[in-house]
Amino acid sequence: MPLPTPLPPALREKILDSPALAPPPGVIPNFTNPSNLEIETYGMVAAFMVLGTTSVGVRLWTKWRVVGRVKWWGEDGMLFISWLIYTGMLMPLAIISAKIGAGTHQWNLTVRQAVEQGYYYNIGSLAYILSMLFLKTAILLQCIRVLVPTGTRNAAFYLYHALLAANIIFYIVSAFIELFSCSPRAKLWDPTIVEGKCVGDITAKRVVSGVINMLTDFVVLVLAQKVVWGLGGGVGGKRRGRLSGVFFVGALPCICSIVEIYYHHRGAIHGDKTHWVSLIAPWGFAELAFGHFAASVVVMPRFFKYLFDKPFFVRLSESLSSRRKDSSEGDDKRWSRVGRVRIESPKRAEVRRPVVTDVEYEELVVNGGMSEREWGGGVEDGVTRPEPVFITVADAMRTV
C-alpha cells in the first residue's frame, strides 16, 4: 500500500522514531549507548588539520617571505581557497558528525538520527567536491608552469590543459548532482519525504565519481613522471630524481581515493550506510590533506634551509621587524631575492652553464642552499655579473 503524500505529521513522527535498519540475525539493537567512532574522528580531524594547515602555511609563507612572489591568481590562490573550504567547512562538519555518533551501525539508530547524519554527510560531500576542485586546479597549474615550456604546444601542453578543463567540468557537475539530484533536496537523506522525485541512485553516482577522480589522479601522476624523465640536455639524473620525487608525492592522494571507492562499494552492498560513510570520510580528509602536502612539498627544502640557516628566533625576529621593499624596485633588477640563477640576459646569446630553473624547482629544490651572494647579479670585486633571467625547467632544455 503506497504511503499518502505528504505524510500526516503523526505517521511521520512514528517513522522517525522507528529503527533506521533491521539488525542482522542474532543482533540486538542498542539505541542507548551504541559503539561509534567519536574519539577516532577527533584524532583524525586533529592530525589532518595539522598536516594540511602546516603544508599550505609553509608554502605560502615561503613564497611570500623567501621567494618574494605569491601567485594569488594562480596555483597559490587556488590552493589557499581549497584549504579554506577544508578547514572552514569540512573539519567543523566532521566534529559535528562525531558528536552525533559517527560510525554507529544503522540498526542502532532511529530514522531521525540517520536523517541528521545524512544531512551533514551531504553538506560534507559538497564541501569535499569544492575543496578538491580548487586543489586539483592548483596542482595542474603548477604542473603546466613547471613542466611545459613557455609558448610551446607539445603533447604535454594539450594533455595538461585537457585535464584541467576536464577536472573543472567534472567537479562542477558533481557539485550540481549533490545539490539537485533530488527535488525537494531533503528527499536525498530523509525517507519520510515521499513527494517529489530523485534522479538516479546517488550512491552509484558517488562510486562512479570516485573512480573518475582516482583515474585523473593517476593520469596526472604518470604524465608528470613521463615529462620529468623525458627531460634531457642539462638536466642530470639527480635533478630529474628530485623533481620526480616532488611529483611522486601525488601517489598518496591516489591511494586514498582507491580506499574511498572500496568503502563506497561495501556500503552500497551491505546497506549499513551510516557506518560505512564514517569509514569513507577519513580517507576523503586524508586525500585532501595529502593533496595539500603534495602541492606544497616543493617549497619545503628551501623553507628548512632558510629556517635553520640562523637560529629560529633570530629568523622570526628578522621576519617580523623587516619590511618588504616595494615591488616596483624590482623592475630594474630582474631576479628573485634568493635562489639566483646565473643565466645571462637575452641581450647576450651565450649561456654560461646549462641551468634548469623554475621558481619552485630550481630555487627551492636544487639551489635551496645557495645564498644571494653566490647567485645574484650586480657588481662584486669590480666584476659585473649578468642579470639573471628566470626560465622554466623545459625552457632551459631549449637553450642548452
Image (tube, rainbow, N blue to C red):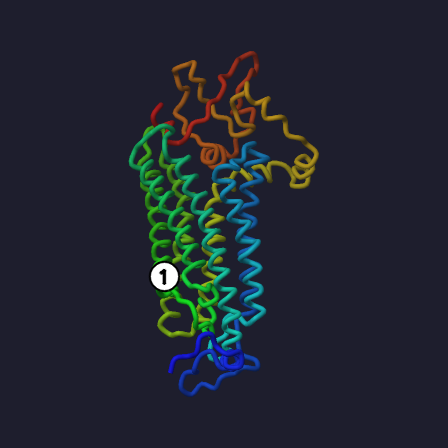
Q: Quadrant of the C terminus?
A: top left
Tag 1 secondary structure: helix
On the image, the x and y values in percent for residue 393 come to 39, 31
Q: Residue at x 59, y 23 (%)?
A: 328
On the image, the x and y values in percent for residue 262 come to 37, 64
- The one of 261 and 20 positioned closer to us in this rendering: 20
Q: Residue at x 36, y 42 (%)?
A: 224
In the rendered structure, the answer to whether residue 136 lies left or right of residue 49 reads: left
Q: Extreme top residue here?
A: 382
Q: Extreme left residue here?
A: 155
In the rendered structure, the answer to whether residue 292 lies left or right of residue 262 reads: right
Q: Quadrant of residue 57?
A: top right
Q: Extreme bottom residue here?
A: 26
On the image, the x and y values in percent for residue 358 come to 45, 32
215 w.r.t. 32: above or below: above
Answer few, some or many: residues within 10 Å of disc 1's Cα (few below 14, many 20 plus, some between 14 and 19): some
Count all numbered tags in the image, as a single digit. 1
In the rendered structure, the answer to whether residue 88 lies left or right of residue 220 reads: right
Q: Quadrant of the N terminus?
A: bottom left
Q: What residue is shown with label 1? A: 205
293 w.r.t. 379: above or below: below
Mark 1: which amino acid?
Lys
- The one of 188 and 135 positioned closer to us in this rendering: 188
On the image, the x and y values in percent for residue 128 come to 47, 55
